Image: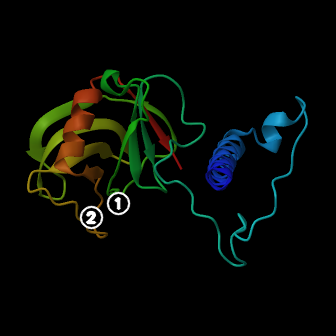
Amino acid sequence: MARSSSGFVAGLTAAALAVVGFLAYQASANSPSKADLAAPGTTVSPAPSSSSAVPPKGKVPSKNVTALPENSGVGPRVVYSLSAKRVWLVGTKTLKGLPPKTFEVMPSTVSPKPGNYAVTSRAASVPGSDGVQIEHVVRFATVDSVTIGFSAAVNGKVASPDPGKRTGGIRMKREDGNALWTFATIGSKIVVVQ
């Protein structure tokens, strides 16, 4: 009998140690961090790690190219970045509360200066100044008698413009052209940023 009770006690002790170990693991997994325990207004330095957040020498951290450019206005608008070759549709009802729809574009050989513009005219389908049949044309500026506007080639190609021609068509994929056409009606705000 003494032998079996000592085995029973040993079993209970092992089970108790397993439970205590499990509870200790749960407590450590759910414990607040140093930053959570710091007094308001104080800063806690993170523990050093083997992987540094600083990029290696000579490398520049990549910028989020899909992030809406700073100082690109307020309210519903189309934002066109010349340097990023990208457009954002900001403030659409279907995108309310979500990041703006954004997509890449192919700039024309003649570009507008950074500033605020408005949609002045639209055309469902016309021949482009480069001879390509285009659709969903949304015009907003004129530079040295060249009309500037967004459009999509009916053939679906987003080719680089001929550098020898003065063209104002900012080309995009057909599905992006359709989204911009739906969003940018006459008078809609266009913001061009560098």
Left or right, 131 with respect to 11, comes to left
| Label pair 1/2, CB-CB below 8 angstroms | yes
Classify mark 1: residues with Cα within 10 Å, few (<14), some (14-19) or many (20+): some
Instruction: Name the residue: 63% across, 65% down.
Output: 61
Q: Which residue is mark 2?
A: 161
Left or right, 119 with respect to 151, comes to right
Task: Tell me: residue 72, above or below residue 168.
Answer: above
Instruction: Name the residue: 32% across, 57% down.
Output: 106
Left or right, 57 with respect to 45, comes to left
Residue 44 is tagged as none
Local secondary structure at mark 2: loop
Instruction: Name the residue: 35% across, 56% down.
Output: 107
User: Which sits earlier in the primary sequence, circle 1 or circle 2?
Assistant: 1
Q: Amino acid at mark 2?
A: Pro
Image coords of residue 20 (percent x, y): 70, 44
Q: Amino acid at mark 1?
A: Thr
Task: Tell me: residue 168, above or below residue 73.
Answer: below
Residue 109 is tagged as 1
Image coords of residue 174 (percent x, y): 17, 47
Image coords of residue 156 (percent x, y): 13, 56
Local secondary structure at mark 1: loop
- The residue nearer to you, when weighing 34 against 103, is 34
Instruction: Name the residue: 19% across, 44% down.
Output: 175
